[in-house]
């Protein structure tokens, strides 16, 4: 018994290392990053595996920033990032836009407000406007809902709307699109933002500067709150990863994404 | 005989490895967290309400106030119900009822916190929003949810404390003509006081460390709450909300938040231990 224990340890260690080898072998691809892209990437991976027997695509969440870190350290073949890269990041990474995503501003169905300007939206989120009657609604407090620090959705919103202003400290902070949705659904005083593809029927979208957020308007370049969804790589890309990226950018991959409510890039 | 030694050695190693886990965690969070506190300065970290990691501002005062408010609120709610339960179960209820109720209260401790949070969001938050105003996600909602969550902790320790009061005290009180209720308030609660205080402190320790349920019902706004109906962010929810994305200084600041929490909880536990030791000491003296 005593002598078999070290053997067991050695076997276990080698076993782990070998599993590691297989997973980074030439026929498997790993993706890590943005939770906004994750559901779409999983859908693509499933379809890809079905069409290409023997290929293996693994998708993990963790957030846009985590995705960049993973791509940099080689923990994943591809990092997923749901915001534009900063100038510094753009020097380090190669990024591929796989689709674009409108950022929808959502309110409760009982809220009479149907449109806001970007300036009004900014004033609402930085706290300068705090009553709905200042933007054409009923008298009552506005409760802005934001996402947590570091979320790709939040960073895109800050870049597209806030123009250097800070989001007010009294804004409610929720940690997922689902939580924002639940809150706006239950409270007519709230206003939030989320991925256009995830809005659904329970919420009302608000026109921004007179333009309704729809996939068509985004495609036509008329709706301005749009962010890119990126696949990010660093250095040389292995052939399996290359092949998966090609699949995502192919007409088939793009129409799968469009069917899920994203805006096709090609 | 040889077996004995072996087993003792193995158990010792197991026990120490559990402790070394604690030591490693402590060293790790302090090593990650303390440098940023020194860099930002204790004033900029503990006494500032300005938390904006992307701009390098790491003030956690509003979250410290948030944790304090929510914990005190939870303790206030938890104490009323727990103490009531403990008194009823040890003094006034027939043995059959106690035997049925006690396991049910302990069952509360087995419900995962995310379930408490979910129930809070779906039922409690809309109720508060509708009847009391505000966003619903609030100090009050978090206090109520946490108050229920710490019920089993406080109740079971309080029951132990009440049962430890010598029977002769109660009999003496009754013999002097006190009613049952007078006996409870004037003799029982006083004699068990230190045990009850320890129960409340341990309950608060659990409340301040709770995360998931609080994230779901507290609203997590960064401002210092100005009323019970205002949203609030606690130290724990701040860590859990931002950990997934954080890197560099931001990550270290979250570890520093953890250090703060660690120190507070250690103080609470030490206080509970001291109080209950005092009681044990007194008893031995008698």
Image (cartoon, coloured by chain):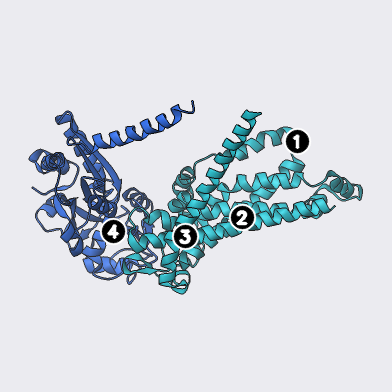
Chain colours: A blue, B cyan
Q: Between marks 4 and 1, how big is the CA–CA gap?
A: 57 Å
Of A260 and A49, the residue lying toward us: A49
Asked if B61 appears above or below B126 in the picture, the reply is below
Marks 4 and 3 close (CB-CB < 8 Å): no
Structural crowding at the residue carrying mark 4, measured as other residues with C-alpha within 10 Å and reported as few (<14), some (14–19) or many (≥20)? many
Front tag of 4 and 1: 4
First along the sequence among labels 3 and 2: 3
Q: Between marks 4 and 3, how big is the CA–CA gap?
A: 30 Å
For the point 53% across and 55% down, the residue is B208
Q: Which residue is mark 2?
A: B269
Chain ID, mark 3: B
Q: Which residue is mark 3?
A: B30
Asked if A230 appears above or below B259 in the picture, the reply is above
Marks 3 and 1 close (CB-CB < 8 Å): no
First along the sequence among labels 3 and 1: 3
Chain ID, mark 1: B
> Where does residue B192 sit, x and y in percent of width and height?
76, 52
Q: Is residue B232 visible?
A: no
> Where does residue B29 sit, x and y in percent of width and height?
45, 57
Q: Between marks 3 and 2, how big is the CA–CA gap?
A: 19 Å
Q: Which residue is mark 4?
A: A154
Q: Which residue is mark 1?
A: B94
Query: Which element carries disc 3, helix, strand or loop?
Result: helix
Query: Which element carries disc 2, helix, strand or loop?
Result: helix
């Amino acid at each position: 018994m005593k002598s078999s224990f070290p053997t067991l340890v050695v076997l276990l260690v080698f076993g782990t290392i070998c599993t590691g080898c297989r997973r980074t072998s030439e026929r498997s691809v790993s993706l890590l990053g943005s939770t906004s892209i994750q559901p779409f990437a999983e859908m693509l991976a499933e379809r890809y595996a079905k069409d290409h027997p023997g290929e293996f695509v693994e998708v993990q969440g963790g957030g846009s920033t985590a995705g960049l870190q993973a791509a940099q350290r080689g923990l994943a073949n591809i990092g997923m990032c749901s915001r534009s890269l900063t100038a510094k990041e753009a020097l380090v990474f190669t990024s591929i836009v796989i689709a674009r995503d409108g950022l929808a501003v959502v309110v409760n169905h009982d809220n009479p407000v149907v449109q806001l300007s970007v300036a009004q939206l900014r004033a609402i989120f930085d706290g300068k406007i705090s009553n709905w009657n200042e933007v054409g609604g009923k008298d009552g407090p506005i409760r802005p809902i934001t996402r947590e620090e570091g979320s790709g959705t939040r960073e895109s919103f800050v870049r597209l709307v806030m123009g250097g202003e800070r989001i007010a400290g009294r804004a409610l902070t929720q940690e997922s699109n689902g939580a924002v949705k639940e809150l706006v659904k239950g409270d007519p005083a709230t206003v939030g933002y989320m991925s256009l593809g995830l809005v659904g029927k329970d919420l009302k979208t608000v026109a921004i500067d007179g333009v309704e957020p729809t996939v068509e308007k985004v495609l036509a370049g008329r709706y301005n709150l749009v962010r890119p969804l990126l696949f990010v790589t660093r250095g040389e890309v292995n052939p399996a990863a290359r092949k998966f990226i090609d699949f995502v950018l192919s007409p088939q991959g793009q129409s799968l994404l469009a069917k899920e409510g994203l805006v096709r890039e090609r | 005989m040889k077996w004995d030694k072996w087993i003792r050695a193995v158990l010792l190693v197991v026990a120490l490895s559990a402790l070394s886990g604690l030591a490693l965690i402590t060293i790790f969070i302090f090593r990650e967290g303390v440098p940023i506190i020194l860099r930002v300065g204790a004033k900029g970290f503990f006494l500032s309400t300005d938390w904006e990691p992307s701009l390098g501002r790491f003030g956690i005062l509003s979250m410290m106030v948030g944790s304090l408010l929510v914990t005190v609120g939870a303790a206030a709610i938890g104490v009323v119900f727990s103490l009531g339960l403990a008194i009823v179960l040890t003094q006034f209820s027939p043995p059959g009822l106690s035997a049925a109720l006690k396991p049910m209260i302990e069952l509360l401790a087995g419900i995962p916190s995310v379930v408490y949070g979910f129930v809070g969001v779906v039922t409690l938050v809309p109720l508060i929003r509708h009847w009391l105003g505000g966003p619903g996600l609030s100090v009050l909602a978090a206090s109520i949810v946490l108050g229920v969550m710490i019920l089993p902790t406080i109740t079971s320790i309080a029951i132990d404390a009440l049962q430890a009061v010598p029977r002769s005290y109660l009999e003496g009180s009754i013999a002097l003509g006190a009613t049952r209720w007078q006996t409870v308030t004037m003799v029982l609660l006083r004699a068990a006081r230190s045990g009850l205080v320890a129960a409340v402190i341990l309950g608060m320790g659990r409340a301040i460390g709770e995360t998931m349920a609080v994230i779901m019902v507290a609203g997590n706004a960064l401002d210092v709450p100005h009323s019970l109906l205002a949203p609030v962010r606690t130290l724990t929810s701040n860590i859990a909300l931002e950990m997934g994305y954080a890197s560099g200084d931001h990550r270290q600041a979250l570890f520093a938040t953890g250090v703060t929490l660690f120190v507070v909880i250690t103080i609470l536990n030490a206080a509970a231990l001291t109080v209950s030791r005092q009681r044990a000491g007194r008893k031995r003296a008698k």
